[in-house]
Image: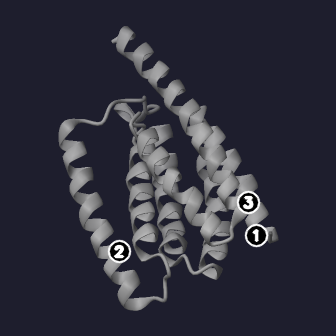
Amino acid sequence: MSPVEVAGFVTGALCVWLVARQNPWNWPIGIANNVAFLVLFWGSGLYADSGLQIVYMALAVYGWWAWVRGGERHSTLHVSRTTTPQWLWLAVAGVLGTGLLHWVLVTFTESTVPFWDAITTVLSLLATWGQARKKVECWWLWIAADVIYVPLYAYKELYLTAVLYVGFMVLCVLGLRNWTKDLKSNEVRA
């Protein structure tokens, strides 16, 4: 267990806890987490997950802005549902993204887990989009990714990170519950 993995564990747990509570400070804490995981995953041969951390950093800047100023008239963004056209876009992007990333990993890296690295990366990107837009269903995408991440990280002998992702699943359930409650509260007021 390296100091980088410990840093990823601490910042990751804090970040997801803050997301579940709809606290916008999750975004800068998340950037610190991305730096730690970029280093950790690269060293473990999880190249797509490593590169994903760079994308996460860019999305964190957008997400931070969206949460604070992305609502009506640049107000706070409220939790909403993913629309049918958005789900269709997510499904197409998911299939195409996984296929393309799998091909890149097989062709240009020595990845020992190209499909699993690709699908978890794409699921995470789709979930991050939903998180940045406060779509309640993003939690289901995170849960799906985490179910794959736990055994993947254990296989790569990143045991502390695997434990972290079990904790993420628990936090995802709490986040889903909290965001659903907030969504219903907003629907009653509307």
Residue that extends furthest to the top in the rendered view of this protein: 188
In the rendered view of the protein, which quadrant contains the N terminus? Answer: bottom right
Which is nearer the N-term, disc 2 or disc 1? Answer: 1
Mark yes or no: residue 25 visible.
no
Compared to 62, does 108 lie above or below? below
**Looking at numbered disc 2 in the image, what kind of residue is underneath it?**
Leu
Q: What residue appears at the point 24 percent right and 35 percent down from the top-left corner?
A: 83
Q: Earlier in the sequence, mark 3 or mark 2?
A: 2
The numbered mark at residue 4 is 1
Give the secondary structure at mark 3: helix
Residue at mark 2: 101
Write the residue at 19% across / 47% down. Answer: 88
Residue 51: percent from the left, percent from the top?
50, 74
Percent x, y of residue 104: 35, 82
Question: Badge 2: how crowded within 10 Å, few (<14), some, or many (20+)?
Answer: some
Camera-side residue of 9 and 66: 9
Most foreground residue, 150 or 16: 150
Residue 22 appears in which quarter of the rendering?
Answer: top right
Q: Confirm whether residue 188 shows in the render.
A: yes
In the rendered view, tell whether residue 13 sits above or below residue 82.
Answer: below
Question: Which residue bears the numbered disc 3?
Answer: 160
Q: Nearer the viewer, residue 181 or 2?
A: 2
Residue for point 35% across, 74% down: 101
- Between tags 3 and 2, which lies in front? 3
Badge 3: residue crowd in 10 Å (few <14, some 14–19, many ≥20): some
Q: Are marks 2 and 1 in contact (CB under 8 Å)?
A: no
Residue 178 image-quadrant placement:
top right
**What is the three-letter code of the residue carrying label 1?**
Val
Q: Position of residue 176 (x, y in %)?
A: 49, 31
